[in-house]
Amino acid sequence: MAEAGTVLIAVRDSVLTDSLRFSLELEGYEAKLCERLLDPPADGALRTCLLLDQEVFTTLWGRGGGVLTRFGLPTVLMVNQRTKRLMDHANAAGVTTVLEKPLLGGVLFEAIRSALDGDAR
């Protein structure tokens, strides 16, 4: 089994952020809060992915959409509802996986694992 990896969490809801960090760490991931998404991560971790919520993604997309592609990181996007427009923006931004809430069972961990292993979409 490959090392778990690092998940950069960019979620506006602080309660959800804490819950995600706790759950990810229980699963063996290093979970880091990503408060500023304008610059690529500096730690150079090889197995790193970005976990975004819809609110953060929409804000980034409003800044031109190219912010995510600069990172070159696999990205898992959590959304309230998949719409054609949202999916078009996610595809254009290079989002690896889009998950619709509620996140039941191990769907989040499966998506992160797949993104880190490079076989998600």
Image: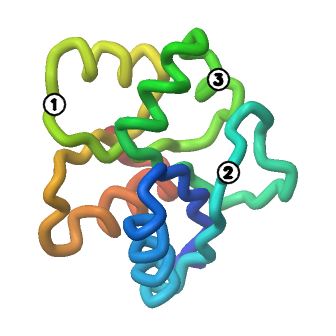
Q: Amino acid at mark 2?
A: Glu
Q: CA distance from mark 3 to mark 1?
A: 21 Å
Q: Position of residue 31 (x, y in %)?
A: 59, 72
Q: Are marks 2 and 3 in contact (CB under 8 Å)?
A: no
User: The residue under label 1 is which amino acid type?
Assistant: Arg
Residue 92, quarter of picture: top left
Neighbour tally class for label 3: few under 14, some 14-19, many 20 plus, Cα within 10 Å: some
Q: Is residue 20 above or below residue 7?
A: below
The reply to whether callout 3 and callout 1 are in contact (CB within 8 Å) is no
Residue at label 2?
35
Residue at image coords 72%, 58%: 46
SS type, badge 3: helix
Report the disc number at residue 49.
none
> Position of 118 compared to 66: left or right?
left
Kindly report the distance in space between the C-alpha atoms of the residues bearing marks 2 and 3.
14 Å
**Helix or strand or loop: what does disc 1 sit on?**
loop
**Which residue position holds label 3?**
67
76 left or right, relative to 9: left
Closer to viewer: mark 1 or mark 2: 2
Q: Is residue 81 above or below residue 59?
A: below
Question: Residue 30: which quarter of the image?
Answer: bottom right
Task: From the viewer's perspective, tell me whether residue 3 is left or right of residue 97.
Answer: right
Dividing the picture into quadrants, the one containing residue 60 is: top right
Residue 77 image offset from top left, x and y in percent: 37, 42
For marks 1 and 2, give the CA distance: 25 Å
Indicate the position of residue 84 as horizontal and vertical percent values: 16, 15
Q: Which residue is mark 1?
A: 82
What residue is rendered at 71% in x and 43% in y?
36
Closer to the camera: disc 2 or disc 3? 2
